Image (spheres, rainbow, N blue to C red):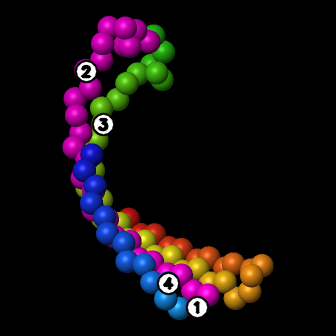
Amino acid sequence: DNNVWARLRVNSFDMWDMWLKGSLSKRDGSEYKASESSSAEQNPLLRRYYLADRDRTQIEARVNHSPIDNLNVDFGVRYA
């Protein structure tokens, strides 16, 4: 599994904290090679499965606002 990400954070405004994060990941599926001690299950629901390939691009944004000491409003969104 390879993953690269970058994040930009802006917190220079009074009572505001904002950040934006982007990431790219690539997972190469592999052939599962079970040992004899780990593959003795009789129940078909306990069978081992191969890991699938996956390429993912993701972006995430979060905004936090603290108008008073006892109140914190947080909003976040993620797209992958």
Q: Which residue is mark 4?
A: 11
| Res 66 quadrant in image | bottom right
- Left or right: 63 in relation to 29: right
Mark found first going from the N terminus, 3 or 2: 2
Amino acid type, mark 4: Asn
Q: Residue at x 66, y 79 (%)?
A: 73
The percent coordinates of residue 71 (x first, y second) are 74, 80
State how far apart marks 3 and 4 are (Cα).
40 Å
Mark found first going from the N terminus, 3 or 4: 4
- Left or right: 77 in relation to 64: left
Q: Which residue is mark 2?
A: 33
**Is residue 77 a member of the stretch shown in magenta?**
no
Read off the magenta span: 14-41
* Quadrant showing the C terminus: bottom left
Q: Looking at the rendered structure, which numbered label has been put on residue 51?
A: 3
Q: Residues within 10 Å of mark 1 (few under 14, many from 20)?
A: few
Contact, CB < 8 Å: mark 3 with mark 4? no
Q: Residue at x 31, y 64 (%)?
A: 5
Q: Which residue is mark 1?
A: 14
Q: Mark 4: which secondary structure?
A: loop
Amino acid type, mark 3: Leu
Q: Mark 1: which secondary structure?
A: loop
- Left or right: 29 in relation to 65: left
Amino acid type, mark 1: Asp
